[in-house]
Image (cartoon, rainbow, N blue to C red):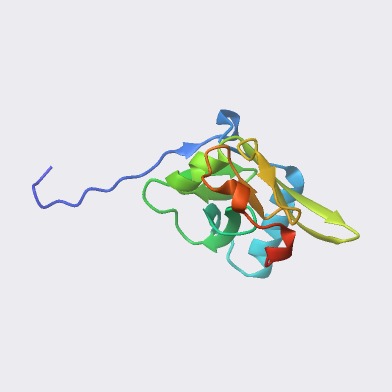
Amino acid sequence: MAVNEPVTFTQPQISEEEHILTVTPAAVSVIRQLLEQRNIPGYSLRVFVSGGGCSGLQYGMAFEQEPRDFDAVVETDGVKLVVDPTSLMYLQGATIDYVDSLMGGGFRIDNPNAVSSCGCGHSFRTKNDAGAENSGGCGTCSH
């Protein structure tokens, strides 16, 4: 390799069997429908964790055309999900489902790393979160 030649880092695709992230058939179906409705068939769904929400951490999702360097890529039935390394620390072993009820439908994340969740289901905390006792309740939730 030449000195000035660019180096590309890629994360291999990870199969669902490795239990990084599990996606239910209902969630796969809804993700596929959203990709078709938005006319972005080759995109991936980014699943991430960021600071905020009622309990200190919150889930987020967005469509992206390409995975970033070091992303974990999980493919289930032709649908790709990407997770950055920091979010993966919080999402390892989680299951993403889509639930449709009388109160409305939406994605639900069953996260074994969460020790508590807000009633909205969009916010959580882990056993290592500092100051979690001072987190607000659902009344502070913006969801």
Determine the image quadrant of residue 101.
bottom right
Q: Position of residue 71 (x, y in %)?
A: 43, 47
Q: Residue furthest left?
A: 3
- As drawn, which residue projects farthest toward the top? 17
Quadrant of the snapshot with the N terminus: top left
Q: Which percent across, then down, holds residue 38? A: 63, 70
Asked whether residue 110 is in view, the answer is: no
Left or right: where 5 falls relative to 141: left
The answer to whether residue 82 of the structure is visible from this angle is yes
Residue 73 lies left or right of residue 58; in this view the side is left
Q: Residue at x 59, y 47 (%)?
A: 132
Point out the residue furthest to the front here.
134
Q: In the image, residue 10 lies at what x, y percent?
A: 36, 44
**Count of numbered marks:** 0
Residue 16 falls in image quadrant: top right
Which residue, as the protein is rendered here, is positioned at the far bottom?
38
Q: Residue at x 73, y 64 (%)?
A: 139
Camera-nearest residue between 138 and 70: 138
62, above or below 69, in the image: below
Name the image quarter holding the C terminus.
bottom right
* Nearer-the-camera pick, 51 or 24: 51
Indicate the position of residue 74 as horizontal and vertical percent values.
54, 42
Q: Nearer the viewer, residue 76 or 137?
A: 137
Residue drawn at (69%, 47%) of the image:
117
Which residue is at 51% across, 49% downward? 82
Viewer-proximal residue among 136 and 75? 136
